[in-house]
């Protein structure tokens, strides 16, 4: 196996917060052993021990913060079971995620419904199943939830900076400062139990200060809530904790220092939770696919994999840069990489430096790909979903 991008492994930023703690990856020997069993389609090889260690490391870095895993990152039941065994709670966006957790005997009261936009039918279902905590970020959603479940425990998602995140979310969700007062007043008016504040710094966030800013804003909102007669008792610091790919990252310990300092003066009766998704599962897995064929088009080299945008490798289209490994050792040349479907959006990378001697049938190995890969995959154009193999 060739470590293609040694140059890219050098930190670009010279900031001391980056890469201060070693990150783990699934041992490549497991991938080789899995391939000895044969290959019929792309697969994700997951090591549940790494998931366990990441859960423990998260808790050690932020002892006061209870992690609630964002199911969407990887909803495989074996992944969820591993997290249950580690005492991790959950965050959901839909009722099929809820059903999955209930089928694994997760108590509904430990499940947080963190999607700011929920259909009335989904709310009725979740309420009937015993879910207690619901997020909102608008007056309309507040009224909708309360009309379905008057005694719901509610938390307000506020806007927070997404500077330094690979997926800035700002704008889609989160109450802007100017609209917070109206929501608090309406909650008091409806005698609704608006009891918490949350924010999401954006996925793969490499700037720990965003959590500090979010926590400081939340503490201000708590004061406004108290003034309106509400009793705030939940701080949910969301997701966004990064994993190592080709760019340097602040470790969870560095983020933890910032968070721990920001929450140090919060009274004991405030429950503090987080919603890590990517952080808990990404490093635990390799994504393995295969080169279907190569071609030269207008003088440029192209390779086509049996998994592309629709087969699980979609985050590259939003700017995530994976490490791409193969068994070839030839000098690197610029390649365009595409998936196997006929859709013109199914292009993964252009001018990606990869060995020139890659050819049909070669395996492609993508480390740290346990999050947002298989969860996104579809059967589009008749190609199979990647398999999830758990060690
Ligand atoms: C997706 C999501 C998360 C998890 O984000 P990561 O970047 O994977 O940590 C957490 N909370 C909410 C509300 C989300 O939508």
Image (cartoon, helix red, strand yellow):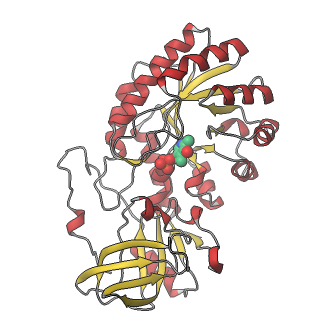
The quadrant of the rendering that contains the C terminus is bottom right
Residue 159 location, x and y as percent? 47, 32
Question: Can you see residue 306?
Answer: yes
Q: Nearer the viewer, residue 247 or 2?
A: 247
Residue 215 location, x and y as percent? 43, 27
The image shows residue 160, relative to residue 151, as above or below, that is below
The quadrant of the rendering that contains the N terminus is bottom left
Residue 251 location, x and y as percent? 33, 47
226 relative position to 303: left or right: right
The image shows residue 369, relative to residue 233, as above or below, that is below
278 relative position to 390: left or right: left
Question: Can you see residue 55?
Answer: no
Q: Residue at x 76, y 42 (%)?
A: 122
Residue 279 location, x and y as percent? 45, 51
Count of all numbered marks drawn on residues in the image: 0
Q: Residue at x 22, y 70 (%)?
A: 6
The image shows residue 227, relative to residue 62, as above or below, that is above
391 relative position to 3: left or right: right
Q: Residue at x 40, y 18 (%)?
A: 265
Q: Nearer the viewer, residue 50 or 197?
A: 197
Q: Residue 129 occupies which quadrant of the picture?
A: top right
State the residue lying farthest toward the left: 14
The image shows residue 97, relative to residue 369, as above or below, that is above
76 relative position to 312: left or right: right
Q: Residue 77 occupies which quadrant of the picture?
A: bottom right
């Amino acid at each position: 196996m060739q470590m293609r991008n040694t140059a890219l492994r050098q930190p670009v930023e010279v900031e001391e917060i980056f890469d201060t703690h070693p990150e783990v990856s699934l041992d490549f020997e497991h991938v080789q052993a899995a391939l000895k069993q044969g290959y019929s389609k792309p697969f994700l090889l997951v090591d549940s021990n790494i998931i366990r260690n990441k859960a423990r490391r998260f808790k050690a870095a932020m002892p006061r913060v209870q992690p609630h895993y964002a199911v969407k990152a990887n909803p495989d039941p074996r992944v969820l079971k591993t997290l249950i065994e580690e005492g991790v709670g959950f965050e959901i966006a839909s009722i099929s995620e809820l059903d999955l957790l209930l089928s694994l005997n997760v108590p509904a009261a430990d499940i947080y419904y963190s999607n700011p936009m929920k259909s009335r039918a989904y709310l009725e279902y979740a309420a009937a199943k015993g879910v207690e905590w619901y997020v909102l970020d608008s007056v309309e959603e507040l009224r909708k939830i309360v009309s379905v479940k008057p005694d719901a425990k509610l938390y307000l998602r506020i806007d927070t900076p997404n500077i330094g995140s690979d997926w800035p979310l700002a704008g889609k969700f989160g109450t802007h400062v100017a609209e917070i007062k109206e929501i608090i007043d309406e909650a008091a008016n409806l005698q609704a139990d608006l009891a918490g504040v949350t924010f999401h710094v954006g996925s793969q966030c490499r700037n720990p200060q965003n959590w500090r800013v979010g926590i400081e804003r939340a503490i201000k909102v708590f004061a406004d809530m108290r003034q309106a007669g509400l009793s705030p008792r939940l701080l949910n610091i969301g997701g966004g904790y990064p994993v190592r790919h080709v760019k340097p990252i602040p470790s969870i310990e560095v983020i933890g220092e910032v968070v721990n300092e920001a929450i140090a003066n919060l009274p004991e009766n405030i429950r503090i939770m987080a919603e890590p998704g990517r952080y808990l599962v990404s490093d635990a897995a390799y994504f393995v696919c295969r080169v279907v064929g190569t071609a030269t088009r207008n003088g440029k080299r192209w390779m086509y994999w049996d998994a592309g945008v629709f087969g699980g490798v979609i985050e590259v289209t939003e700017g995530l840069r994976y490490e791409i490994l193969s068994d070839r050792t030839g000098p690197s040349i610029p390649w365009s990489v595409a998936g196997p479907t006929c859709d013109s959006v199914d292009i993964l990378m252009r001018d990606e430096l990869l060995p020139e001697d890659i050819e049909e049938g070669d395996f492609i190995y993508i480390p740290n790909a346990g999050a947002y890969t298989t969860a996104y995959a579809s059967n589009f154009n008749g190609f199979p979903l990647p398999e999830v193999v758990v060690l």
